[in-house]
Image (cartoon, rainbow, N blue to C red):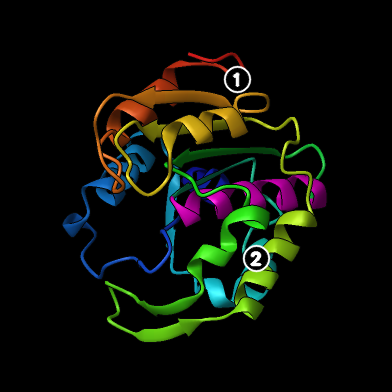
Amino acid sequence: MPQADKRPLFYFHGFNSGIPADISESPKISAVEEYARRSGRAFHPVNVDYRQVMKYSRELLDRVDENVERVLYCGASMGGWFARIMQILLAGARPGLSVEAVVFNPAFNLAEFSYMLEGPQANYITLEKYEWTRAHSKQMVELESSVDYAADLPFWVYVDSNDEVINAQWSEKWHRDFARFKAFPGGCPSFDHSREALEDFDNGCWTRALR
C-alpha cells in the first residue's frame, strides 16, 4: 500500500452542493486537495446525498482500509457536521486509530435546526430539484444522536465571522467546550480561509483551548 493511501483525507461538501467535475472551480476544495498532496495524504472528495445519510455513513466506514495509519475527515457546512460524525463513528469502530476532523463553517445541533431545511430545495451543482422532508430531517437527527458529538477526539472548527447562514457566535458557543475553535474576520458562507485554516491545523497541536 503506498504511503499516501495509509493517510487518507476524505472531504465532504455542503448541503445542496457537490464535488464539481473540475475541482479547480472551487477554491475551497482546491485548497484541501493541495494540502493533501503537500502533506502526503490520499485525497478522497466524496459526493454525499444527505437524504440518505445513514446509508452513506455505513458505506464510508467500509471504505477505510484496514491498513490505514491516520485518517483525516474534512468538510464544509453540512459536510463539516458529517465529517465530525464520521470521525466519531470510525474512532468507535477502530479503537487506537488516529482519526482527526477539520471543518469549515460547519452545521451543528441538527436536533434543533434540521427543520429549517424542510421544503423545496435545489442542488446548485447537479441542478436537481427536490423536496426535503421531515423524514430526511429525522434521519439526520437520529444519526447525530447515535454518537457522542462532544467526544474528546481531535476536532478543529474554523468559521468565517461573516457567514450569513451559520452564525459564528452560536457556532463558538456550541463547539468551544470540545473543539479547537477559530473565527476568521470577514469571509462568507462559502468560507474564504481554507488555506489559512489548514496551515493553522498543520502547525498546531490538538488542544481545545480557544484561539
Indicate the position of residue 14 as horizontal and vertical percent values. Answer: 41, 59
Q: Secondary structure at mark 1?
A: loop
Q: Residue at x 30, y 79 (%)?
A: 126
Query: Vertical placement of 19 versus 67: above or below?
Result: below
User: Which of the two residues, 63 or 159, is positioned nearer the viewer here?
Assistant: 159
Element type where label 2 sits in the image: helix
Amino acid type of the residue tagged 2 in the rendering: Met
Q: Residue at x 28, y 33 (%)?
A: 193
Closer to the N terminus: mark 1 or mark 2? Answer: 2
The crowd level at tag 2 (other Cα within 10 Å; few <14, some 14-19, many 20+) is: many
| Left or right for 198, reference 125 | right
Left or right, residue 72 beside residue 123: right
| Range shown magenta | 77-93
Along the viewing direction, whichever of 84 and 176 lies nearer the viewer: 176
Residue positioned 66% across, 75% down in the render: 55
Look at mark 1 in the image and give the residue it sits on.
206
Q: Which mark is residue 140?
A: 2
Specify the principal SS of the magenta part: helix
